[in-house]
Image (cartoon, rainbow, N blue to C red):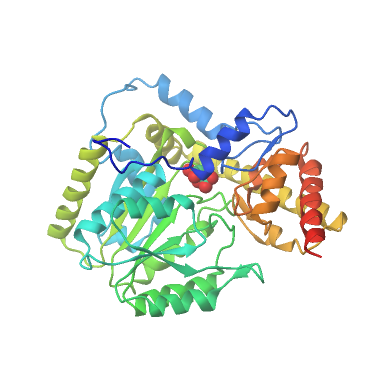
Amino acid sequence: MSKYFPSVKELPPDPLFGLKARFTSDSRSDKVDLGIGAYRDNNGKPWILPAVKKAEAQLVSGANYNHEYLSIEGFAGFVNSAARIILGDDSVAIKENRLLSQQSLSGTGALHVAGKFLKEFYHKSDAKIYLSKPTWANHNQIFQTLGFETATYPYWDNDTKSLDLTGFLKAIDDAPKGSIFLLHACAHNPTGLDPSKTQWLEILDKLVANDHLPLFDSAYQGFASGDLELDSYSIRTAVNSKKFSAPIVICQSFAKNCGMYGERVGAVHVIPSETNEALNKAIVSQLKKIIRSEISNPPAYGSKVVATILNDPELFKQWKDDLITMSSRINQMRIKLRDSLVELQTPGTWDHIVNQTGMFSFTGLSSDMVKRLEEKHAVYLVSSGRASVAGLNEHNINKVAKSFDEVVRFYTKSKL
Ligand code: LMR
């Protein structure tokens, strides 16, 4: 192709952002976007959380407001509060001085910093990283770009539309000791299917028994159930049990739960199992080197907004109300979609839509059905059949249900 770039090949568009671009250029007035995971209000519009609006007003009118550089590790008022939110005030990791936190470019940046650090310093330098099957498409490319070999563990059982716990546990046992397991802390993306508390205990115990390193991706805390504590159950249990001798790593995003998608607010937390001041200093210095070399220092604005919310009791209460507003509207839409499909007698079973949680429903629609939805009905979903339930509202739910019904019947008929 070129003497200087002989192997460069054009890649297909990113599955999610490519979908967004197709949706934007579609001129049909009744189009519906159930693609990218971003919350919409009942009129299909982006929603600035009331807590965020108030925090922004407070922040920009403050005497000390400026646009100076943050330090490499980020805005302290944000990083410390973010850690408390995810781990709980009484976390043993905080009490025992085993918590090493840095601000990141949202969840993706946190995964990247964590991956880069692990690739260089984790004692098993050839450790594979195990991803759920299916998982968020970006997980694969983040870790492959960093030179990891990725593998999968069974997660979604398509026949029962539920968790394949047996397959998951077996994969944990079969993986070489000391592997890295990426776990969705809550609101699994794309399936919307989370382990129960008892299932989490089994999963965590198995990871401990095999000396694997848990790498938690927490992108939906408070967004799934409306409750910050419940949505951090897996993480808090792993940390507070003190059973892990491997370190625990947490990648935390505030994109969804604060609706701060474009501001890239997040943190990466490394929790070694032993308290060792020299080790702590060494790890922090290496994390800072990665951050400095890649982004110099993290973006300030979003982290200051989130810090304002987390450190002001009234704004914090408002945020908790906002989380309930978002999660309960999504739950209502789940129920409406299920009920409409049942009423239309759409072939198949639809209870999984209400049993799932968070932003997404793994509908069970095939890629052919999804293609037809887009072409014939202007309803946009990811080809895996994942629908962003946040894109549903009172005005489009009937159209969406009827469109689902048409494509399911179309392909059910053509199979007979
Ligand atoms: C999604 O899965 O739709 C979101 O997490 C957006 C993204 O960055 O992929």
Q: In which quarter of the image is residue 237?
A: bottom left
- Please tell me which residue lies in front, 235 or 351: 351
What residue lies at 80% left-to-right and 41% top-to-bottom? 399
Q: Position of residue 280 (x, y in %)?
A: 18, 56
Image label count = 0
Taking 400 as reference, is 9 left or right?
left
Quick one: quadrant of the N terminus?
A: top left
Q: Position of residue 347 (x, y in %)?
A: 81, 61
Regarding residue 393, the answer to whether it shows in the image is no
What residue lies at 34% left-to-right and 20% top-to-bottom? 63
What residue lies at 33% left-to-right and 39% top-to-bottom? 77
Q: Where is residue 321 in the image (x, y as percent from the top left)?
A: 60, 42
Taking 47 as reference, is 31 left or right?
right
- In the rendered image, the residue lying farthest to the left is 278
- Please tell me which residue lies in front, 409 or 208: 409
Regarding residue 407, the answer to whether it shows in the image is yes
Q: Where is residue 312 in the image (x, y as percent from the top left)?
A: 45, 37
Quick one: quadrant of the C terminus?
A: bottom right
- Please tell me which residue lies in front, 359 or 315: 359
| Vertical relation: 239 (above or below) 11 | below
What residue lies at 51% left-to-right and 38% top-to-bottom? 17
| Vertical relation: 262 (above or below) 357 | above
Q: Quadrant of residue 187?
A: bottom right
